[in-house]
Structure formats: structure tokens, C-alpha cells
């Protein structure tokens, strides 16, 4: 609603209350009549500030804290003498002592200036006339000097130089006659009374018995030189440091809060699966044999699969049912046939190398012999080659070159902190003639004290130490399999003691290093025969080779046990050569007599639906 301007003059009085017009001339308009909006009256307001100078106030602020009480901090450090540790055969890991810089500061300042005044104490003497007079005259008369030489010329004479040496005696005997008493003629009787002999009319005399030898010519004597030879092998003197071995300084690990990657931990060997101890076991064996790659099934009446720790391929023998099955595995224009054997979930792939057949009236027998595919790296399948490396080469690099373009790979598993080391073979040392790849790989492997364990169903070579842990440390080592006494079908043991050496000398021939490997904690006084090979060229590989050689000795037995072959989900499963096994034997006096051993050979036999595995174990006492 607009504000209608009043007519005439209007007085405004501001009294702090709302403004109210004197007349009720306010009307509502419907908008049909034009309304002129007049501007509101302008008002002038005078304002005056009532501000004055503020009073000065002083603000006092006090701290509620007083003086701190000094606290004395005492720090006590307890140091004890560390136990001496046995020296490590690898040497002491100390680096170079850091050099210290010595500073010499000479505080020389500027010397104060001094004035040197030199004043002569000499004065000029008075001038005087110089008179020189000679006191000599010509009273001495010159005379002629005559020189007379009293020496005369000696007469010439010939100089004769006579030598007192005569020719030596080259041919007579060099033996001398013994000094013996010669009886005079006639014989004289002597009576010895332990007193001096007194002759009548002569003074006392001493007798000397012996013959007087005539003067003989000088005889030459052979010069005898005696040389004492001993072994030039030096042994490292043990160095015992009372504070123990040195440790390499490591950088601190810091993990940010932004979710970045953290440092991975070293994988540890898993603990073996614990078997179920039962009074009886019910096993359902499954056996299947197919021909690759079509997977055509065939039936084997009896079969045996075996591997020992010193072989590089699994072996198979089996009997076929009928001539039709033999026709499926016979070689053709594509070469040998390959078959896959699956026993309780454990698979093997074999090449059928050969077969035999025997027929007679009313009876037929067909046998096949197979080997794992690693045999392709050996004779007669792989060609023989010769090689000589002029530059340095790593051992694992050399193995990779031998497996190049073959489809095979090599793996180096770490078992109980031991694995096959890698080392450098100097140029000119790595050479061979007319050898297959497998023979070269086996030689490199045995140089490091390792063995080749072929994979069952893949083209992989597992190269690992022969002894994953030293026998004297098996009690602390992690086992691969645990076999309870309730699973053993049979057990046979054969005592086989070996010399117990505690040191061995391992050295290269043309290049490399020589290492005297000693068993820790022993005196090293029972050395084994020295090991000298061309490819032993570094301390690490020489030490690992020596450790495996020392592990072979001592009192031991070969124990053969027979157990069922359980499936891959039931312990203990398949035991392969090179694995450490714990046998929990409770058959002796009704108590647990657990012992540990190394598996040397495995043989799986299947006949008439019964499957067993026979293990050959090396047990140390």
C-alpha cells in the first residue's frame, strides 16, 4: 500500500515511537486509477559522537608456573663379557677401519715490529804518514844447487813362483787304516798300575798307542746335501674374537602411511604335514595310464617307478595286457611314444624307450621300459659337443646355456639355509670335449656337492645340495616328511660305517682358491683325501663341496622301509630322494624312538590294486 503524501506542511517529531499521521487519510486503491507515487520526504539527521579518551589500564599477567626443579638423570650401563664364538670357515667379516683426520692448528700471530738501530763504535783515526823499510840486503850470494841421487838401478832377476800344491789322489781308496797299537820287536810286557811310566835313567813319559800314518795326497770328497721336504699346505690359524663375529650394518626400514609396498620377508621352509595315527588304514588306490597327447588309456598289469639320488631321470618298468596295448606304445615315424602315469594323484611322464615281447603256446608277455624326459639331454638323444670359454662365466649361466633351446629349465631350491651356490669360473678353465648337455650339468652340479632331482611331470631340473642339512644338525633341521610306525609295512637295516673325517682340503687345479674345510667345533685332525678339480675356483663353492663331503662319513646304516603310497592330500604322501624324513618308531620297548634320515632312493610298486613305496634311508648315529 503506497504512502499518500499529506497536504500542506507537516511537522515531524522524533520521540522514539512509531510515526502516526494526524488524519486517517489512508485508503486502499484497486489499481483502476493511476496513482502517483511521491518520493518520501527527505530527513536530515544530525548525529554527534560522544567518544572520549579511554582510560589507560595496566594489565598484569602472572604465570602460574614457578621455577623448574632440576632433575638428575642417572643412566646405568651393564656390560658383560660375551662368550667366545667359534671361528667361521668363511673368514671374519670386518671391513677397513675408518681413517681419522688429524688437524694441526698452529696459532702464529704477527710479531710486533721492532726497530733495529745499529751504531758503530769506531771513529776515524788521524791520518799518519806510512814509512816502509826493508831489513834484507844482498849479502847472500847465489850458489849452484847440485842434487845427487843415492839410488842405483837394481839388477834384473827372474821371479820364480813355486806352488806347494800337488796333484790330488783321484783313484785310491778313501778308507783310512784304524789307529792301532803295533807291537814292537821283540814283544814287551806291560804292567799297568795306574801310575806314570818311569824309565831307568830317563824322566817320566806318556805312552800314545796308535799307528803313524804316512802323508798321503789330498783326496776329493763328495758334497752331501740333505733336503727335508714337507707339505706346503698351509692351514688357517683360528682367530677367536671375544666379542663374536662382526655384523653388517643395515639401514633402518621405514614404512610410510600412504599404503606403499613393504619389504618382503624371506620365505621359510614349511613344516611337514602331521600324519594321522590310526590303528588301521583303509586305502583306495587309483591307477591310470594314458598315451600322450591323445590320452588314449592303456592298462598295465604290473608296474614299478624308481629314482635314486645319483640319477637324473625316473625309470619305469611295466607289463602290458595283450599285443594291442603294445601296438599303442610302439615307436613310429614321429619317434618314441610318451605316456602319463597317475597313481593316487601323483603324476609322472615317461618316454617308452624300449620294450620286450615273449610268446609261447597259451601265454604272452609284453614288457615296456620308460624314462623321464630328462633323458633327452643325454646320449643317445642329445649330440655331443665341445666348448671352451675364454672369458669368465658363472656356473648357473653355464647351465642355462646348456639348456638353451631345449625347453628345459633349472631351479635351485633353498633347503634348511643351504642351496647350490653360484660362482665364477675364470676364462680358460671352463672347457670340455665331446660331452652331452646333461653330462656337463652333472659335472657342474657335483662340483658344488649337489645332485639333480628331476621333476616328475615337467621339464624341470631341481639342483639342490646332496645334504640339505648336515647330519650333525638334523635335530634342529626342518623335515620334509614324517612317517609314523603305524604306517610301516616292513623295516630292514644294514650297518655301514664310514670314516669320520672332520676336515678336507678342497682346491682348484689351474686357477681358483684352496680352502681347508673343517667341521665346526672339531680340531680338524682327521683330514679326508684332498679334492682337486678344475672348476673349484671360489671359496663359497669349495666350502659347500667340503661340507657335503664331510657329511658322508661317520657311523651310519642303510634302512629300508616299506609304506603305502597315500594320495597328495594325506601325509606322508610321496617321499622323493634328497628329502629329510623323520621316522617315529615306537616298536622298541613300547616308547617313541624317533630318528631322522636322508632319502637315497624311492621305488613305487603297483600290482593287483596294491600300491606301496619302498624307501632307502641313510641314518646317522
Image: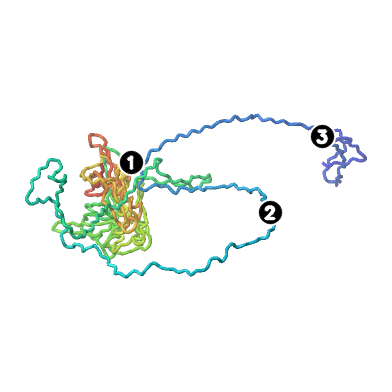
Image coordinates for residue 145, horizontal then vertical, percent: 47, 68
Image coordinates for residue 390, horizontal then vertical, percent: 36, 63
- Name the outermost residue toward the front: 139
Q: Cβ–Cβ below 8 Å for labels 3 and 2?
A: no
Q: Does residue 176 appear left or right of residue 239 in this picture?
A: left
Q: Choose between 163 and 509: the one closer to the eye.
A: 163
Q: Does residue 49 appear left or right of residue 366 in this picture?
A: right
Disc 2 to disc 1, how far (Cα)?
109 Å
Residue 53, label in figure: 3
Q: Residue drawn 86% across and 37% down?
A: 48
Q: Residue tagged by mark 1?
A: 476
Q: Residue tagged by mark 2?
A: 123
Label 3 neighbour load within 10 Å: few <14, some 14-19, many 20+: few
> Compared to 271, does 455 lie above or below?
below
Disc 3 to disc 2, how far (Cα)?
97 Å
Mark before the other along the chain sequence, 2 or 1: 2
Disc 1 to disc 3, how far (Cα)?
93 Å
Q: Secondary structure at mark 2?
A: loop
Label 2 neighbour load within 10 Å: few <14, some 14-19, many 20+: few
Observer able to see residue 456? no
Mark before the other along the chain sequence, 1 or 3: 3
Q: Residue drawn 65% across and 29% down?
A: 64
Q: Choose between 208 and 341: the one closer to the eye.
A: 208
Amino acid at each position: 500500500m503506497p504512502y499518500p503524501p499529506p497536504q500542506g506542511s507537516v511537522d515531524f517529531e522524533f520521540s522514539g515511537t512509531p510515526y502516526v499521521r494526524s488524519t486517517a487519510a489512508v485508503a486502499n486503491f484497486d489499481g483502476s486509477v493511476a496513482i502517483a507515487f511521491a518520493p518520501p520526504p527527505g530527513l536530515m539527521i544530525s548525529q554527534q559522537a560522544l567518544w572520549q579518551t579511554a582510560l589507560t589500564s595496566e594489565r598484569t599477567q602472572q604465570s602460574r608456573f614457578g621455577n623448574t626443579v632440576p632433575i638428575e638423570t642417572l643412566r646405568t650401563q651393564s656390560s658383560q663379557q660375551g662368550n667366545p664364538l667359534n671361528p667361521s670357515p668363511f673368514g671374519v667379516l670386518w671391513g677397513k677401519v675408518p681413517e681419522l683426520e688429524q688437524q694441526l692448528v698452529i696459532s702464529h700471530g704477527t710479531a710486533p715490529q721492532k726497530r733495529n738501530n745499529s751504531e758503530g763504535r769506531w771513529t776515524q783515526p788521524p791520518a799518519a804518514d806510512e814509512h816502509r823499510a826493508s831489513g834484507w840486503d844482498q849479502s847472500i850470494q847465489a850458489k849452484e844447487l847440485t842434487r845427487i841421487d843415492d839410488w842405483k838401478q837394481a839388477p834384473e832377476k827372474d821371479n820364480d813362483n813355486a806352488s806347494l800344491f800337488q796333484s790330488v789322489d783321484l783313484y785310491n781308496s778313501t778308507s783310512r787304516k784304524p789307529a792301532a797299537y803295533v807291537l814292537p820287536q821283540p814283544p814287551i810286557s806291560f804292567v799297568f798300575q795306574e801310575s806314570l811310566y818311569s824309565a831307568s835313567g830317563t824322566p817320566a813319559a806318556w805312552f800314545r798307542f796308535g799307528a803313524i800314518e804316512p802323508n798321503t795326497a789330498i783326496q776329493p770328497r763328495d758334497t752331501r746335501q740333505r733336503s727335508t721336504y714337507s707339505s706346503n699346505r698351509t692351514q688357517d690359524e683360528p682367530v677367536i674374537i671375544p666379542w663374536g663375529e662382526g655384523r653388517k650394518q643395515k639401514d633402518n626400514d621405514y614404512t610410510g602411511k600412504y599404503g606403499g609396498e613393504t619389504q618382503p620377508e624371506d620365505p621359510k621352509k614349511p613344516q611337514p604335514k602331521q600324519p594321522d595315527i590310526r590303528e588301521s588304514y583303509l586305502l583306495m588306490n587309483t591307477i591310470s595310464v594314458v598315451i600322450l597327447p591323445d590320452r588314449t588309456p592303456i592298462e598295465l598289469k604290473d608296474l614299478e617307478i624308481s629314482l635314486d639320488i645319483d640319477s637324473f631321470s625316473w625309470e619305469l618298468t611295466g607289463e602290458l595286457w595283450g599285443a594291442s596295448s603294445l601296438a599303442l606304445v610302439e615307436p613310429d615315424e614321429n619317434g618314441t611314444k610318451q605316456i602319463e602315469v597317475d597313481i593316487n594323484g601323483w603324476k609322472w611322464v615317461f618316454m617308452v624307450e624300449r620294450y620286450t615281447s615273449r610268446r609261447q603256446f597259451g601265454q604272452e608277455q609284453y614288457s615296456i621300459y620308460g624314462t623321464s624326459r630328462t633323458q633327452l639331454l643325454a646320449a643317445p638323444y642329445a649330440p655331443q659337443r665341445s666348448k671352451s670359454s675364454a672369458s669368465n662365466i658363472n656356473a648357473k649361466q653355464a647351465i642355462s646355456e646348456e639348456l638353451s633351446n631345449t625347453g628345459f629349465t633349472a631351479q635351485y631350491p633353498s633347503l634348511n639355509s643351504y642351496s647350490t651356490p653360484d660362482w665364477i669360473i675364470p676364462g680358460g678353465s671352463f672347457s670340455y670335449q665331446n660331452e652331452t648337455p646333461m653330462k656337463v650339468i652333472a659335472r657342474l652340479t657335483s662340483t658344488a656337492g649337489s645332485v639333480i632331482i628331476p621333476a616328475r611331470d615337467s621339464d624341470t631340473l631341481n639342483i639342490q645340495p646332496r645334504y640339505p642339512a648336515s647330519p650333525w644338525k638334523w635335530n634342529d633341521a626342518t623335515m620334509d616328511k614324517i612317517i609314523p610306525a603305524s604306517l610301516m609295512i616292513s623295516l630292514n637295516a644294514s650297518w655301514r660305517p664310514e670314516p669320520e673325517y672332520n676336515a678336507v682340503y678342497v682346491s682348484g687345479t689351474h686357477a681358483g682358491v684352496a680352502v681347508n674345510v673343517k667341521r665346526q667345533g672339531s680340531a680338524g685332525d682327521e683330514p679326508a683325501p684332498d679334492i682337486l678339480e678344475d672348476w673349484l675356483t671360489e671359496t663359497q663353492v669349495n666350502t659347500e663341496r667340503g661340507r657335503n663331503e664331510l657329511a658322508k662319513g661317520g657311523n651310519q646304516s642303510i634302512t629300508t622301509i616299506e609304506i603305502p603310497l597315500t594320495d597328495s592330500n594325506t601325509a606322508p604322501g610321496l617321499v622323493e630322494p634328497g628329502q629329510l624324513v623323520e621316522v617315529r618308531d615306537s616298536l622298541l620297548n613300547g616308547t617313541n624312538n624317533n630318528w631322522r634320515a636322508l632319502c637315497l632312493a624311492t621305488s613305487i610298486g603297483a600290482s593287483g590294486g596294491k600300491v606301496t613305496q619302498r624307501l632307502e634311508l641313510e641314518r646317522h648315529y
